[in-house]
Amino acid sequence: MGTSVLTLKIKRYHPGKEPLRWTETFKVETTQGMNLLEGLLRIQEEQDPTLCFRYSCRGAVCGSCGMEVNGTPLLACRTPVERLLKEPIRISPLPFFPVIRDLVVDMSPFFENYQKIEPYLHEKPAIPDREHIMTEDVRKAIDPYIQCILCGICFGVCPAFRREASFLGPAILAKAFRFLLDPRDRRGKDILQSVDHHRGVWGCNTVFRCVKACPKEVPPTHAIVRMRGKILKGHCARLFSRFSFLLRILS
Amino acid sequence: MNQPQMEILSHDILVIGGGLAGLRAAIEARKAGKDVAILSKVHPLRSHSVAAQGGVNAAFNNVPAPVQDSCENHAFDTIKGSDYLADQDAVEIMCREGLDRVVEMERWGTLFSRTEDGKIAQRPFGGAGFPRTCYAADRTGHNLLHVLYEQVTGLRIPVYEEWHALSLVVGEGRCIGILAFPLFEGKIVPIRAEATILATGGYGRIYLRSTNAIINAGRGCYLAYQAGVPLEDMEFVQFHPTSLYGTNILITEGARGEGGYLVNVKGERYMERYAPHLMELGPRDIVARATQREIDEGRGFQGQYVHLDLRHLGKEKIMDRLPGIRQIAIDFAGIDPVLDPIPIQPAQHYSMGGIPTGVDGETPLPGLYAAGECACVSVHGANRLGGNSLLETLVFGKRAGKKAASIVRGRKEALPPSAFHKQAEAIRAGLRELSSRSGEESGFRLRDELKTLMTHRVGIFRRKSDLLSAKEKIRELKERFGRTAIKQNRLAFNHEWLLHLELEGMLHVAEVITEGALTREESRGSHFRTDYPERDDERWLLHTLAYKTPEGTRLEYKNVTITNSPPKARIY
């Protein structure tokens, strides 16, 4: 296979510069098996050292290089350029987040929401110095939600933020569900209560865009729908018990 | 020009690096009630620890085996694996305390895979006599790092994210903090700390073929080296036998632990000829050399790679135990390991050497501690066993955090700012000078030349002539480095400048590795000299210490601590 040329139209943003925003076209010679991150690194090295973007693992596990490519948010390192050679590729920063510079966005809205759900195991009392006993079935139920690399791509595709800017967001609700499923966590209903509002599970449009976009196949919408179910079941049970209490008093 | 009064930050303890060792150290220091902060050039979750796959060793005996496993067995396997260069007292601590550290990670929420009776699952790994490696499918690093970051979040430990450490500041013979550079803000910020803990990982990216993240350029080791701290055993560079051909992304040893075969172009399971008992589960140095030899002697595919065949494991086992590997092979090689063998080749993977520390992370420079891959305790000696690096980060991260906390006297505000100011001015002047040069050399080109050189001349098989030419070439690269320039002279977002500083460190680390390899006329663990193919305990049962001098590297040697396992022949 010979080399061919990749054309990237990259959205630039440099505060303090005039103009502030512009779109710049770069051409890069490709090599076999090249991915988009390698293409960007080559531009930074050979053409424009001021081009800013994040990277680390180059193996789709660290979650650094989320960006929008032809309107679709994805990880640059996991995107082979072969299928992008036909026409110029539009590259812009991950949507939703404020842009700091070029393709670097401010992830703090994401991690602020992350902190809101107290995303750490609130451990049930257990025998000292011993692991908890857990079956493989329980582990497998939690496992899909553990795969999340907190890259923020799901925030970039989620339409719910348009209606409710303070929506917790898909990855964060998936994280909450992960602790709800975990028999080692003592919070149980408290977790459900903490997401039982329009900024939580009721804010979701259930259009599954996050599920489709997730590079690690995490299904946040499934988590949200199941939490809704549990919440409703809880409400019904409470209503029923109140009703039967009333009946008992009356009789 | 008068500089405006610089802001100055102070902490009892500053941890540099947000991977497993750094986070574990910070948690321990926080739990001891100290004011600790973490500084990391990437968000902690983007640290290379996240890419660790196979598992973490601890002798729990959770899987039925004909004989009982024990800490002593684990220590023995580690020492033998190290080709007897590990300090045995440190290995014993790691193997003993590892049990508690792994249980602790489970209690903090790590989703380990489970045995039938619900305990932490364990799989066989290279060079180990027992199924001792605790795992969370094949994403153990991801699971551990996310759990530690969750703990850091819960403890509200401040993190200086995307801040870079420019230099260590030394005053009156102590490390009193660092100069930091928040990339997005464009200023140099002194951070005073009574104790500084380096947990900056490895230097894999000085090699062309490496499993390491792009960010792993050995900067932390260089910070210490620059400050007068020696580097220990740097010639011992681990090459992992199975990196994905093309991108060199890691394919875990767990794939062989689960029963995968290594196969050459003739269809032979070639490990039969190199480690007839352990076969594919020989220690990494032996399997990497065997694999490279097969390729070099024409028994590879296209002269480049061999096959890691998992097909006989069946879809269910692959999906259950090795889902990450399958995803990597599909994403980065277009191959589904359920249907086709994975093309693999050896690549640089890990640094056994690093900043010399005692068992509590203390370095020769008072006030400075180190833990994790950047440190050399030494528990890995000349060759690390798979599953021992995650263990090291947890055990010695905690110990370093605890020790650092114990020396804090609440005097951070009393550390004199003058040394910081002087050093910051020198760094600013350096940047001005650098951006005013004409720059006939390109840093990126030098970096690529260095990487190619290291893989081809200071790689798996080494010999005097290659090492001499590498030494010469590194000298030339250093000289040409003096003629590189950068285009931007401002601080903010000056990624180009950071890469320049990084390259400076890479050149020095490469020089240390090459000098160590050239001088050590024996073969031990990962360091294999074709002109000295035997281990030589008479002359070389010694740790190397490399000091920075104006003329280059000066080498000294120190004894290895041996407790219960006198050196023996290493047969697998």
Image (cartoon, coloured by chain):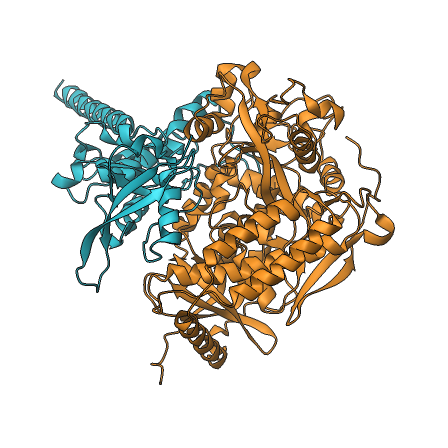
Chain colours: A cyan, B orange
Looking at the image, can residue B494 be seen? yes
Q: Residue at x 49, y 28 (%)?
A: B325
Residue B316, x across and y down, in percent:
49, 16
Q: Residue at x 55, y 49 (%)?
A: B451
In depth, the one of A142 and A234 nearer the eye is A142
Relative to A1, is A111 on the left or the right? left
In depth, the one of B402 and B365 nearer the eye is B365
The quadrant in which the N terminus of chain B is found is: bottom left
The residue most toward the bottom is B2
In depth, the one of B429 and A135 nearer the eye is B429
Relative to B135, is B433 on the left or the right? left
Tell me: residue B296, above or below residue B193. above
Relative to B312, is A195 on the left or the right? left
Residue B486, x across and y down, in percent:
40, 65
Tell me: residue A167, above or below residue A229. below
Q: Residue at x 29, y 38 (%)?
A: A153
In depth, the one of B293 and B54 nearer the eye is B293
Q: Residue at x 27, y 28 (%)?
A: A212
Residue B559, x across and y down, in percent:
79, 57
The residue most toward the front is A2
Residue A80, x across and y down, in percent:
37, 33
The quadrant in which the C terminus of chain B is found is: top right
Q: Quadrant of residue A86?
A: top left
